[in-house]
Structure formats: C-alpha cells, structure tokens
Amino acid sequence: MKHVDFTDVIADALRPHGEGEVDVAALRAGTMARVRAARRRRAALVTVAAVAAFGVVVATVPRLVPEGGRGAEPGAPPSVSAAPSRPVVRAAALPSSDAPGAAQRPDTVGTDRGVLHFDVDLAAFHGTGTWWRSGRGVERGEVWTGPGGAGDYRHTATVVISQSLDTARAGGPGGETDTTPVEVTVAGRPGQTQAFPEAWGAGTTVWTLWWQPVDGLWAVVTMEAAAGDPVDAVVTAAEGVRFDRSQRCAVPIRLDSPPAGTEWESCTTAMEPAAANARSWQTGSLSFRTAAGGTLQLSYGNFSDAAVEGANFVPNRTVAGRPAMWYQGEAWQLAVPDGDGRNLFVGIRGDGVTEQDALALAAAAVFSDNLIDLSTWPARPVG
C-alpha cells in the first residue's frame, strides 16, 4: 500500500484550531491504485499535488484515475479487484515498544509521539495494509484492504483512541445521520454503534462503534458495512483491537531534537505486505508545530509531486550537497529526490516557520541506509 501521507499535512492545514480531524481517508483513497501502478512501472512516483499545496490535493486526489480508467468520485474509495488466488498476505508489523499498552496505562495515550499504545488484528478487519499516526492526545490506525500487488487498495476501517470521547469521535465519518444508535457489547464492555449511509461515497454504509475498553480510555472503530450482519461485523472488528500491546512509530529518520522553537506534533508511518514489496515500509512523516500555530513537516518515502517530477524538477537549493528544489503552491515546499522513487519533502505553513527552517530540518535529518529491516532504525525518531 502506498500512502501519500501528505494528506496528514493537509488535514492539519485545513483543521481550524479546536475543531476535529479532517477525514484524510477520503483524501487519500483516490491515490492508491495510481501509486501502485507507478511502482510496478518502476517509476514509483505518485502524481499528486499534495506536497505542492497542503490543500490543493483536496481537489486533485479524488480525480485521479485508478487502473482500468474508472475515475473515483470525490470521497469514494477505489474498488477492490477480485480476490487473488494466492493466500492473503498481511502488512508487516511495526516494532514492538516496551511501553505499556493502553489497557494498562490509558493515561499515556497521545502523550508520546514515538509510541502507539495499541495494535490491530488485521484478520479481524480483513486488512492487508496499515497507516498509523501518533499525535497530541490521540492515536490513529487505518486499515487498507487489497489483493497485494493487483493494483487496488481501499480504506476499510479506522481505529482512533483517546482519553476524550469527543477527540476520538472527531476522527469518525462525519456528516449527519438519522439512524438510531444500537447498543452493543465489546469484550464485555458496553458500547454503541451507528450507521452513516454513504459517508464514504455513494453506495457505501459506514458504521461507527464507540466504547470504553477500560476506564479512562475511549475507542472508536469506523468501517464499511460488511455483507451479512454489519453490527456483528463491526463488533468483531472492535474486538480485534489490541489494547494490551504497544508499538513504535517506526520511520528511518533520526533527529536529535525538534527544530528550534517547535514541539513535536505527530509521527506517521505506513506499512504494506512484505511479500508484495521487499521494502514493506512505504512512507513516514514527522510534524512539528510552533507556538504561533505554524506547521513544519518532514515526509519521506515512496511518493512524489507532479510539480517536481522529471523535467519539472529544477534545482535551486542544495541540502547536504544534494540538489533540491524550493517551490510554492498554496504553501512552500522543499523537495529532495533520493532515488528509486523515494523523495524527501519538507513543507511549511503558517506563522513562525521559514525557508531557513525547512532547509535546516532537511539538513539535520539522518536517514537509515537500510529501508527493509525496521529493527535497525532508531528506537525514537526524535530526541
């Protein structure tokens, strides 16, 4: 699965202070088929304008055309191809953390950007790829499903945990519904689930289930309705969330400290089946925020931006002796190609961040030479 996690930057940019999360799943869904097709052609470049503008991608991503030529409607995930004849291969796992899981220490959820205090049983979600985010006061996991190499992935479920129900539910499907919540039990704990028709596009029904797996912690699972009994399916998926585990937000990047005048805001990382690609890790990002609310984000992995692809890449800066391009869409970005389809981008937006901050962050980052063995990566990407 090829996650273009600049949609996380987009979400931060679009989200007013004090409001809930933007639904990055809808933004990200339309890119999946295009990205894998490019990878198989060895181009490994995703023609997405996300890195050019933090917000322009809202218009461009849903209009990308998946393989087969069928355009995706805004907000609708691409279709999943017919199931492959070979066994389903699950996404590679993130390295485990020594930190207690959310069940043991719910008060630690959302306090350490380098740790995710939960895991998911991908079989319960019928998932083959994952995307993770550890942020301030909230942690998020997304499950993606596809046949692993056939070209189509679709976002099928989101898990959000937080000490606040409002914060956890802000990552749900959004929109209004006149359906009545259904009382359910998840691993012996009471909860509620509710249907949101067409929340992820025409012809889809999304179910959101919220409950307290332990006192002091809220969890929300949002997923497409399954064939058969959708309530039973979402409860089964919820029972596949593992709160007794913790894992590292692993990225092949190391910074000694956050950039001056900023705080570490979030870490994201994405994994796909190792059998579909020897390098199971795909993308990652580290986001930092100034006291004035500005954003500085370093992202690295298997993605690109049409604005700097091929002949469009016109070096006008250098980073550690390597050619780089500083350019502007609706926001400023620094692009540093790294070969074999990998690219480094540093984006800035808002107050308190400058071009010099972006250049300094790119120069300060140390990258792992081994992008296959996650155990060789830094135990913590920052600090």
Image (tube, helix red, strand yellow):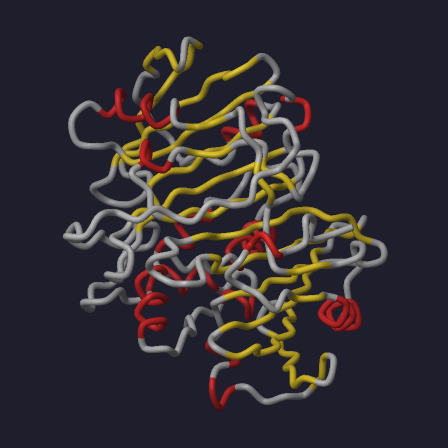
Q: Is residue 133 left or right of residue 334?
A: left
Measured as percent of width and height from the top left, residue 176 is found at 38, 31
Q: Residue at x 34, y 22 (%)?
A: 194
Measured as percent of width and height from the top left, residue 24 is found at 46, 49
Measured as percent of width and height from the top left, residue 171 is found at 49, 36
- When the figure is inspected, residue 128 is found, relative to residue 220, above or below; the finding is below
Q: Residue at x 34, y 46 (%)?
A: 90
Q: Is residue 339 left or right of residue 366?
A: left
Which one is in front, 77 or 92? 92
Q: Residue at x 72, y 79 (%)?
A: 319
- When the figure is inspected, residue 267 is found, relative to residue 301, above or below; the finding is above
Q: Quadrant of residue 199?
A: top left
- When the figure is inspected, residue 131 is found, relative to residue 367, above or below; the finding is above
Which one is in front, 62 or 381? 381
Q: Residue furthest right?
A: 260
Rendered-image quadrant of the N terminus:
bottom left
Q: Is residue 301 left or right of residue 255?
A: left
- When the figure is inspected, residue 375 is found, relative to residue 171, above or below; the finding is below
Q: Residue at x 60, y 70 (%)?
A: 344
Which one is in front, 248 or 194? 248
How many numbered marks, from 0 up?
Answer: 0
